[in-house]
Amino acid sequence: MSQLRKTENHKNITYYREAFSDIKVYINNNKSGKALNQPILILSVIDLITQGFINDKYILISDELIDRFKKYWEVLGSGSYQGSDFALPFFHLKNQKGKFWHLKFSSEYDGGRPQSIPKLKHDIDYAVLDDELFSLIQEQNSRKDLIDALVSAWFSSDEKKIEDVIDINLKFEDASLKTENTTESEKENIQSSPKWSLRKSLIREAFFRKEVVHIYDYRCAFCGLKVKKSINQTIVDGAHIKTIVDGAHIKPFSEFYDNRINNGISFCKNHHWAFDRSWFTVDKQYRIIVSEDLEEESPHAKPMKDFHGEKLILPKSEEHFPEQEALEWHRQKFEG
Ligand SMILES: [Zn+2]
């Protein structure tokens, strides 16, 4: 608790990670669950900044923001959506202990809290993010960190299992645009049209990474490395663990838009890098094939070449194994 106050003078990534993890949510009386309106609102704002719909620190009560919020609400919220689900968190975020959301009240504000979107628009001109936070969201790596903090704290409880994530992928994806058959012009469409922009959502990538490393028990499938490090001393439960392994796409997301678990393998940073550059690949029996061209010096760790012929460390359940078709694609790239 004192941690927040101590760091308030120099707000940095740690400050905001902690602020996001520490949001006080309201208990939803109808259900056993907590009302996740505020985390969902932050996700929606980050999403729109990432995609260029929001270009500065001023957060207007726009149709885009409300729409994005509703999309996330459909898969992450509880109960059917009402205007108050958006209006109240927009208003209440200012009260969080970790200050990052500031409101510009309209001249007509007459007290109380807005229960509907028209009333919110009447009461509030816009919200303002800290300058520090806005620039952290714009920067790719810190943005990933912030999203991971939100997802870890709020959307990975025991009730939110893989099925939910798959559900998210289905809802945000159009079945008619199956990746294998996507033509060049369709791809251009995907990349230029805001309608398809959810496909590129970093938040969905955060879910992908999170689920893949979870399925692989936070271990690198190549070398077995497993390091867990808590963000800080005050947070000790398992939900807040940050790992140095990463969920890697077998077929690159930028080309195939495939965030299914079977298109993922958990690798440490080094082996993720090496896999993406085809320094090694995997055969039909999931054995590691290291490139003969690879020259390396590895005085303190087992060289990559020594893993040649070893089997990947796979998930417990066969249904989560890497897809053969995706591995085949990777082998072709490796050989080419
Ligand atoms: Zn590794």
Image (cartoon, rainbow, N blue to C red):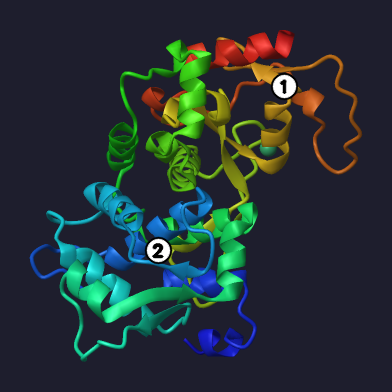
Camera-nearest residue between 280 and 309: 280
Q: Is residue 196 above or below residue 235?
A: above
Q: Quadrant of residue 143?
A: bottom right
Q: Is residue 7 above or below residue 200?
A: below
Secondary structure type for disc 1: loop
The crowding category of the residue bearing disc 1, from other C-alpha atoms within 10 Å (few below 14, some 14 to 19, many at least 20), is many
Image mark for residue 35: none
Marks 1,2: beta carbons within 8 A: no
Residue 186 image position (x, y, % from top left): 46, 19
Q: Residue at x 16, y 74 (%)?
A: 115
Q: Judge left or right: residue 41 versus residue 286.
A: left
**Quadrant that contains the C terminus:** top right
Is any part of residue 41 visible from this angle?
yes
Which quarter is ligand 1 in? top right
Residue 202 image position (x, y, % from top left): 49, 46
**Residue picked out by circle 2:** 42
Residue 101 image position (x, y, % from top left): 43, 77
Estimate the spatial distance between the alpha carbons at disc 1 and disc 2, rounded to whole Å. Answer: 37 Å
Who comes first in sequence, dot 1 or dot 2?
2
> Quick check: is the Cβ at mark 1 less than 8 Å away from ligand 1?
no
Q: Amino acid at mark 1?
A: Ser
Q: Residue at x 87, y 16 (%)?
A: 293
Image mark for residue 278: 1
